Amino acid sequence: MTDPLSPSLVLVPVDGSEESLVAVEYAAAIAEEYDATVHALYVVDDEVSRAFDAGTVDDAALAADSQAFLEAVIDVVDDAGVPLSTSMAAGFSTARLTQHPGSVVLDTAEELGADFVVVPRHPVSGDSDEVLAKAAEYVLLYASQPVLSV
């Protein structure tokens, strides 16, 4: 009997937090089990987005921080032996008021054809890196794909 759940692309939004790295571990395990690919979407929080738009963010520091985290993501996915693709998106937009982390995750899932989403769900501690905590419930409510919240 075939498994009704057989994803080919697992989307995992990340935000630089430890919780999102744990979500990557789950996404990699699911991808390994079903011979799927993992796509890690780095969602940039609103403070960083605004600073970037205003030109007040240190581009080199932002790139270094993002790259260091993505290298940790690569290590986790490589250990599972599954293919990985990555992208980055702003979680909020001053030009598009309906853009928020949850909508960015769901829009990306649709654009990529992701058929499974693993989203980190953790309490908001005030840490600006934990942008995905704001998105988890939205994704759980509105995703058309199966969602694992960790």
Image: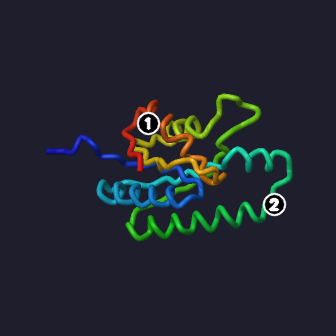
Q: Nearer the viewer, residue 141 or 6?
A: 141
The image quadrant that residue 91 belongs to is top right
Coordinates of residue 40 in the picture (x, y in percent): 52, 54
95 left or right of 147?
right
Callout 2 amino acid: Asp
User: Which corner quadrant of the image does residue 114 belong to?
Assistant: top left
Q: Nearer the viewer, residue 100 or 82?
A: 100
Residue 122 vertical placement versus 141 (above, below): below
Q: Which mark is residue 140?
A: 1
**Tag shown at residue 10:** none
Q: Position of residue 47 (x, y in %)?
A: 74, 47
**Label 1: element kind:** helix
Q: Compare marks 2 and 1 and give the one earlier in the sequence.
A: 2
Query: Mark 2, residues whose alpha carbon is within 10 Å: few (<14), some, or many (≥20)?
Result: few
Depicted 74 relative to depicted 130: above or below: below
Q: How many marks?
A: 2
Given the image, on which type of amino acid does mark 1 rest?
A: Leu
Whether residue 30 appears in this view of the structure is yes
Please give the name of the residue rendered at 42% of the width and 61% of the height, measured from the top-left corner: 25
Q: Residue at x 65, y 29 (%)?
A: 98
The residues bearing labels 2 and 1 have C-alpha atoms spaced at a distance of 34 Å
Q: To which residue does mark 2 refer?
A: 58
